Image: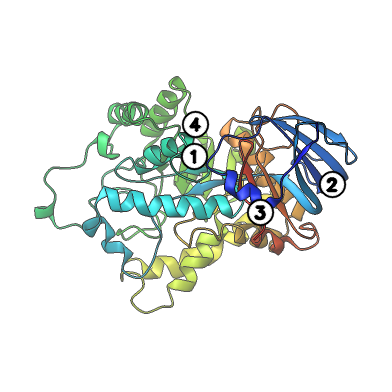
Amino acid sequence: MQAKVISLAVLCGLIATAPQAATVIHAGTLIDGTDSAPRQNVTIRIDGDRITAVENGLQRVRDGETFIDLSQSTVMPGFIDSHTHLSSQLAQGSYMHRFTDNPATTAVRAASFARLTLHAGFTTVRELGDSDHVSVALRNGIRQGHIEGPRIFAAGKSLATTGGHADPTNNVRESFIHSPPTPADGVINGPLEARQAVRKRYQDGADLIKLTATGGVLSMASSGDNPQFMMDELESIVATAKDYNMRVAVHAHGRDGMLRAVQAGVDSIEHGTYMDDEVIAAMIEHGTYYVPTITAGKSVAERAEIDGFFPDMVRPKAREIGPLIQQTFATAYQAGVKIAFGTDAGVFDHGENYREFVYMVEAGMPAHEAIRSATYNAADLLGQLDNLGTIESGKLADIVAVDGDPLADIAILADVHFVMRDGQVFKTRD
């Protein structure tokens, strides 16, 4: 009996089917997501959706095994984007979508963005804020094989205080608001409502909690950085989330809101623009991850120069806050804050997530560490190191490949030519 050799082109036709029982990949160079140096000529064996062995040398393909030849490529774990919004994409006029688009329209658009994200090499994402339960439905559709996309850890609707960054009624005429938003809508005031909101996210099927601890750039509110939660509210959210085994991600630009959130015990700070030495020290003490989203900052700063792109209330915030995030990242990295890769995709175009790698390296992070931030570190933030983040025996078979050496030129991660998720091939070379 002969080993089954299937070309990459033919494998495209297997996308809608279950993964082969046994698959062998020959990797020319392997960057495995650990802190080890790259290895040359490595064999990866896969059974179903799991890696069963990682062997030195290009080992013999056994009878009945499917062979994938990546011996001329650099192979890495599937990337993890720790901050995405698949249900939206910022564009001229998109501020009107919440008034014009029904949930079905949003879901169809989200499915297309999910496919773009997977084909860009991102096999897992944290979905940090949506509407109409789209991200939970999208997650389930991908799990069930109805939709092509990354593995999703969904937060559902973000939590805000009245008038806060994620209050959906900001700047909406009162006659259009049938009743004030409630914890079920993601708007809370006080620790009791905070508990109710977390429990509602759990009931809705969310995997984690996202809250907006400070003002934000794109919301229709005047401040982009003021603190918007009191300590008792933050502590109530964190304590309740832990009861349900849910982690807490926190949008924060301003220093005071960030410090309160870190002291309350949240798991990650997103954006972190006005992080100072006291916040950095607190994050290191508490082991809090930083998810920088440099790409979003640069993108909104660029678009702020386009007349009419942003509402007048948003434009000055985008000009001021957006350009600062890359320097904050550089300072936090040099200080030793734990960093997980995250882009805020949706604020810029989906499928361009790779840009974050370029900006991180540009700001002083070595390329190998940048890749680890999107593999090992991001899996650690998710609490999924037993399953994700490295190419090792026992892990889920999430594997991507590129031509060339990303440690020499990180920008080649823009052109991922092979994507496997859960042992199933979703993209091969054209």
State how far apart marks 1 and 4 are (Cα): 14 Å
391 w.r.t. 164: above or below: above
Residue bearing mark 1: 152
State how far apart marks 3 and 2 are (Cα): 27 Å
Quadrant position of the N terminus in the picture: top right
Name the disc covering residue 288, or none: none
State how far apart marks 3 and 4 are (Cα): 40 Å
Residues packed near mark 3 inside 10 Å, few (<14), some (14 to 19) or many (20 plus)? few
Is the C-beta separation of discs 1 and 3 under 8 Å? no
Q: Of circles 1 and 4, which is in front?
A: 1
In the structure shown, which secondary structural element does the residue marked by tag 2 occupy?
Answer: loop
Q: Of circles 3 and 2, which is in front?
A: 3
Considering depth in this image, is 11 or 366 the residue closer to the camera?
A: 11
- Residue plotted at (12% across, 53% down): 176
Quadrant position of the C terminus in the picture: bottom right
- First-in-chain label (3 vs 4): 3
Residue bearing mark 3: 9
Q: Residue 188, how many percent across, how many down?
A: 28, 37
Is the C-beta separation of discs 3 and 2 under 8 Å? no
Considering depth in this image, is 346 or 10 the residue closer to the camera?
A: 10
Is residue 165 something one can see in this rendering?
no
Task: Name the amino acid type tagged 3.
Answer: Ala
> Which of the 4 image quadrants contains residue 19?
top right
Residues packed near mark 1 inside 10 Å, few (<14), some (14 to 19) or many (20 plus)? many
Q: Of circles 3 and 4, which is in front?
A: 3
Task: Name the amino acid type tagged 1.
Answer: Ile
Residue bearing mark 4: 247
In the structure shown, which secondary structural element does the residue marked by tag 4 occupy?
Answer: loop
143 w.r.t. 320: above or below: above
Residues packed near mark 2 inside 10 Å, few (<14), some (14 to 19) or many (20 plus)? some
